[in-house]
Image (tube, helix red, strand yellow):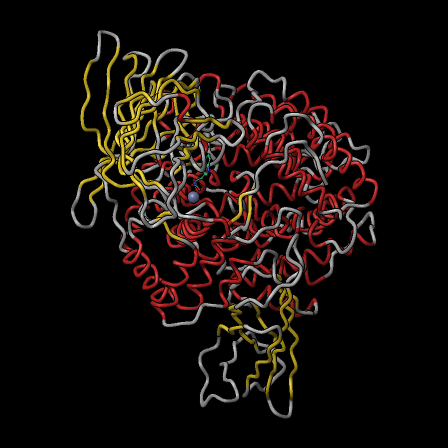
């Protein structure tokens, strides 16, 4: 389809060419004034003799240009050209090496995109990844150009007492009676995307960390003054992350200062700028009474994530943006392992897989499906995806599954030995893993080349006479846009076989002289395989894809009894959880097919749930996960054929209500058992199980349950319990519910992050008036569409609210489409994330499909649409062909 007159440039991975010029050093001066900032840049540029020679120097840039000087002389206008669509500046016939000076002027107060230099609540921040540096000055804004940076900041003393940039502070002083200056030097070469500046009025919380080689590192967290009392958890998390990376991977921090700055207006979670991380407040601030246990976990893992980037991302960076998963997949894997080592490995694994299935599987099955190393993009910001991050982490995890922890660590060490200080590719990482473990990983590249979630189908044949079991395994990957035929993947499939008493059989293949343990990793390379195990004296129950050993969809025809058995006995916690999920899913899909107003639950579910609840050995966090139904989005993907999302929500709610009714006394009893006399962070598992019980109790109309929620709300000394009570009442009608919601808003109106929870709950509610309420939220005094956290809390939650977003009359679609267009005018990144909620339209029943298509068509025809939204919507519409 052709949508706009000027079709945007498509960037291709195969077009990569080394930069014809390199920057040895860049000295920046930011002259910060009230309405604008002048940026003076002095570059030492030389030709790259490893690249194809070019006479002209092409810089990226999108700032207003005041001056160009080359080797001290003003560069005449006829010797350069600006292309504003391409955002380039071309200097004709430049010498072999030279000093280039450029002055630009930028307007942070007017910058609503939150890329480049922007203002938030009177302070100034930068965001440069991936291509934001070009909004500040003209430069070779690509990750394989690595330079030494110095930054001098000059600003009013009272308005901007704090002036920060990367590296070490080397000087500061007074420039006149109202203004001061600070100079920073970063001793490490880096690409422009890791550059950062912060200027403003911020309080600092300090601590220190002694590295294992005995160096002292100053730790500093910068926040607004009223948030100082919410920084302790972030500081503790940072120290834990530093220690963990030393212990697990032998990696130490390499500068004298580590700074973290929190900002309320931020497009994503956080950013790993060298020595100066900038964070969304959501991932820094946490205090018992304002943040839930889930928020605490989020802060710790994002703090870890950004810290771990210092090695995996900064010391070794990406050659080009197609390689993004090189740093993101690896760093997500590292932050997952960090959390797993600190708390419960099983719980973390389940949470991660749940997230992968809820958010990445749909992406991999939809119109924007792409490999973890994409082949093309229009707007790079659209490729900070669940696929690049979360599936990328699964791909990295498979190396560890193949080689063990030791082998993985050896591979990582070789990677650093070879590539420290370089900008490299995913192939370089794979090669280091292969060489360190002397293993041929050629076929493994397909995980980087092919999009789509592979499906693995297993059949089991038992021979009572031979006492042998054969697993027949086939793999297949569905077509994705632009990729119809997929080659087979290298898949590690971890399996075990249980006897009827729940004991795992020792696994011995026919050609082996003895058993090799009772769990093993089968390596699939072909489309079909057979593996035969001997000395199995009884028809076993197979446990397949244990610990989710590969990012695939597994198919095996389990009977309900076998699932019940695994739900009760599997020694792999992940698969134990998984068996329950399959049982729940089957029950919900049956209810969808044959709706009955009083859904009866199969006995295996009731008994399975009871067994989990009463188990003495399972921890409460695991119990809570095991008793949570699959998410609506997961179910949406599992529906065979066309989806009616409203019917799906109703089916899920019917099963939830049936569970609530049939086990009412159990939920009540467990709710009481979960109460603790005093608050301890370590009791988060108990709180999560308690709030799950409260939610089940309130899944049916029951005044006693409402009262329990009310009492919990009123007595709560922590946000988990307070928000848990509100969440349990989210879909209920009645004065108590309304009163508690009012009270909450009154109480927390000054706490932006807490108000976001309140906004999200309203927009996610199944109550009939949700669309009206959501529209009203946009007028709430605490709301601002310009703030990404707020926009996501209201509109993101609404778009995930299957009942109301998919209202049969199309009102939900129209509402969100209009808001997308409005937001696109000032923040394309946020708009593009929201418009992605339309991506699964071809899976819908015909009427809704038509309604969604209309909205997408309206959007794509809009004049002045951003590249970001255009790319997503045009791909979405193409998927229909
Ligand atoms: N690199 C960052 C991370 O994963 C995320 C990031 C990329 C980002 N682009 C961004 C954050 C733009 C904010 C805005 O940690
Ligand atoms: Zn990252």
Q: Residue furthest left?
A: 214
Q: Is residue 591 above or below residue 702?
A: below
Left-right relation of 337 to 654:
left
The spot of residue 689 in percent (x, y) is: 54, 47
Residue 835: quarter of image: top right
- Quick check: which quadrant has ligand 2? top left
Residue 152 visible somewhere in the drawing: yes
Q: Is residue 841 above or below residue 752?
A: below
**Looking at the image, which is closer to me, 660 or 319?**
319
Q: Residue at x 52, y 76 (%)?
A: 504
The spot of residue 97 in percent (x, y) is: 27, 37
The spot of residue 614 in percent (x, y) is: 56, 57
Looking at the image, how many numbered discs can be counted on the residues? 0
Q: Residue furthest bottom?
A: 465
The spot of residue 703 in percent (x, y) is: 69, 34
Residue 287 visible somewhere in the drawing: no
Residue 847: quarter of image: top right
Q: Residue at x 31, y 17 (%)?
A: 31
Q: Is residue 106 above or below residue 313?
A: above
Instruction: Check the picture and name the quadrant holding the N terminus.
Output: top right
Q: Is residue 784 above or below residue 3?
A: above
**Looking at the image, which is closer to me, 445 or 779?**
445
Q: Residue at x 33, y 50 (%)?
A: 50
**Looking at the image, which is closer to me, 21 or 871?**
21
Left-right relation of 786 to 56:
right
**Looking at the image, which is closer to me, 684 or 767?**
767
């Amino acid at each position: 389809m052709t949508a706009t007159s000027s079709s945007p440039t498509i960037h291709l991975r195969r077009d990569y060419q080394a930069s014809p010029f390199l920057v040895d050093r860049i000295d920046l001066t930011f002259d910060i004034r009230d309405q604008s900032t002048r940026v003076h840049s002095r570059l030492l540029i030389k030709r790259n003799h490893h690249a194809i020679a070019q006479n002209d120097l092409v810089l990226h840039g999108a700032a207003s240009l005041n001056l160009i000087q080359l080797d001290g002389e003003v560069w005449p206008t006829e010797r350069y050209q600006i292309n504003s669509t391409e955002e380039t500046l071309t200097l004709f016939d430049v010498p072999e090496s030279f000093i280039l000076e450029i002055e630009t002027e930028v307007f942070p107060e007017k910058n609503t995109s939150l890329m480049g230099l922007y203002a938030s609540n009177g302070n100034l921040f930068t965001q440069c990844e991936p291509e934001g540096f070009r909004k500040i000055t003209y430069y070779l804004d690509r990750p394989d150009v690595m330079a030494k940076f110095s930054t001098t900041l000059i600003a009013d003393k009272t308005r901007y007492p704090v002036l920060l940039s990367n590296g070490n502070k080397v000087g500061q002083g007074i420039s006149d009676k109202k203004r001061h200056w600070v100079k920073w030097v970063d001793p490490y070469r880096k690409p422009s995307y890791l550059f950062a500046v912060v200027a403003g009025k911020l309080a600092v919380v300090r601590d220190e960390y002694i590295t294992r080689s005995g160096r002292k590192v100053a730790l500093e967290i910068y926040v607004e003054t009223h948030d100082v009392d919410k920084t302790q958890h972030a500081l503790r998390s940072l120290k834990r992350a530093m220690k963990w990376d030393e212990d697990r991977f032998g990696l130490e921090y390499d500068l004298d200062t580590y700074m973290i700055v929190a900002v309320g207006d931020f497009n994503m979670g956080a950013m790993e700028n060298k020595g100066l991380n900038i964070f969304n407040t959501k991932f820094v601030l946490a205090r018992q009474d304002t943040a839930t246990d889930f928020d605490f976990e989020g802060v710790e893992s994002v703090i870890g994530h950004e810290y771990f980037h210092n090695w995996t991302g900064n010391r070794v960076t990406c050659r080009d943006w197609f390689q993004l998963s090189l740093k993101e997949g690896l760093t997500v894997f590292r932050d997952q392992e960090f959390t797993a080592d600190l708390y419960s490995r099983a719980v973390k694994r389940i949470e991660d897989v749940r997230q992968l299935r809820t958010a990445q599987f749909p992406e991999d099955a939809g119109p924007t499906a792409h490999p973890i190393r994409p082949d093309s993009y229009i707007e790079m910001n659209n490729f900070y995806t669940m696929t690049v991050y979360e599936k990328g982490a699964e791909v990295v995890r498979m190396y560890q599954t193949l080689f063990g922890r030791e082998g993985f660590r050896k591979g990582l060490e070789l990677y650093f030995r070879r590539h420290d200080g370089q900008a490299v590719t995913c192939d370089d990482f794979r090669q280091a893993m292969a060489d360190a473990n002397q293993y041929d990983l050629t076929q493994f590249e397909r995980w980087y080349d092919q999009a789509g979630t592979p499906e693995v189908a297993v059949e089991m044949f038992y021979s009572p006479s031979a006492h042998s079991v054969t697993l027949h395994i086939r793999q297949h990957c569905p077509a994705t846009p632009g990729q119809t035929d997929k080659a087979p993947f290298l898949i590690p499939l971890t399996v075990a076989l249980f006897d009827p008493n729940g004991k795992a059989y020792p696994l011995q293949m026919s050609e082996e002289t003895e058993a090799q343990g009772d769990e093993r990793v089968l390596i699939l390379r072909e489309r079909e395989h057979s593996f035969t195990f001997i000395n199995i004296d009884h028809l076993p129950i197979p446990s397949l894809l244990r610990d989710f050993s590969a990012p695939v969809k597994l198919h095996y025809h389990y009977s309900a009894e076998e699932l019940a058995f695994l739900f009760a006995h599997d020694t792999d916690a992940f698969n134990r959880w998984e068996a329950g999920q399959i049982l729940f899913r089957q029950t919900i899909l049956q209810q969808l097919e044959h709706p009955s107003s009083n859904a009866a639950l199969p006995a295996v579910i009731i008994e399975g749930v009871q067994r989990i609840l009463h188990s003495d050995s399972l921890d409460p966090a695991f119990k809570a996960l095991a008793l949570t139904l699959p998410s609506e989005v997961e179910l949406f993907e599992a529906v065979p054929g066309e989806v009616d999302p409203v019917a799906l929500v109703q089916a899920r709610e019917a099963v939830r209500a049936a569970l609530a009714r049939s086990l009412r006394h159990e939920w009540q009893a467990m709710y009481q058992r979960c109460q603790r006399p005093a608050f301890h962070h370590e009791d988060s598992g108990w709180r999560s199980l308690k709030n799950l019980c409260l939610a089940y109790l309130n899944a049916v109309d029951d005044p006693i349950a409402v009262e329990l929620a009310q009492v919990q709300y009123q007595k709560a000394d922590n946000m988990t319990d307070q928000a848990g009570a509100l969440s349990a009442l989210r879909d209920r009608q009645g004065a108590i519910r309304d009163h508690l919601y009012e009270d909450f808003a009154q109480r927390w109106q000054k706490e932006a992050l807490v108000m976001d929870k309140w906004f999200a709950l309203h927009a996610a509610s199944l109550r009939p008036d949700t669309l009206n309420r959501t529209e009203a939220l946009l007028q709430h005094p605490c709301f601002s569409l310009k703030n990404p956290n707020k926009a996501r809390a209201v509109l993101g939650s609404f778009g995930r609210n299957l009942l109301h977003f998919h209202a049969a009359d199309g009102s939900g679609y129209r509402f969100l489409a209009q808001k997308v267009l409005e937001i696109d005018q000032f923040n394309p990144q946020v708009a593009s994330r929201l418009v992605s909620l339309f991506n699964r339209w071809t899976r819908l029943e015909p009427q809704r499909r038509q309604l969604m298509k209309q909205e997408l068509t309206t959007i794509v025809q809009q004049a002045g649409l951003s590249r970001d939204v255009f790319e997503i919507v045009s791909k979405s519409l193409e998927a229909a062909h």
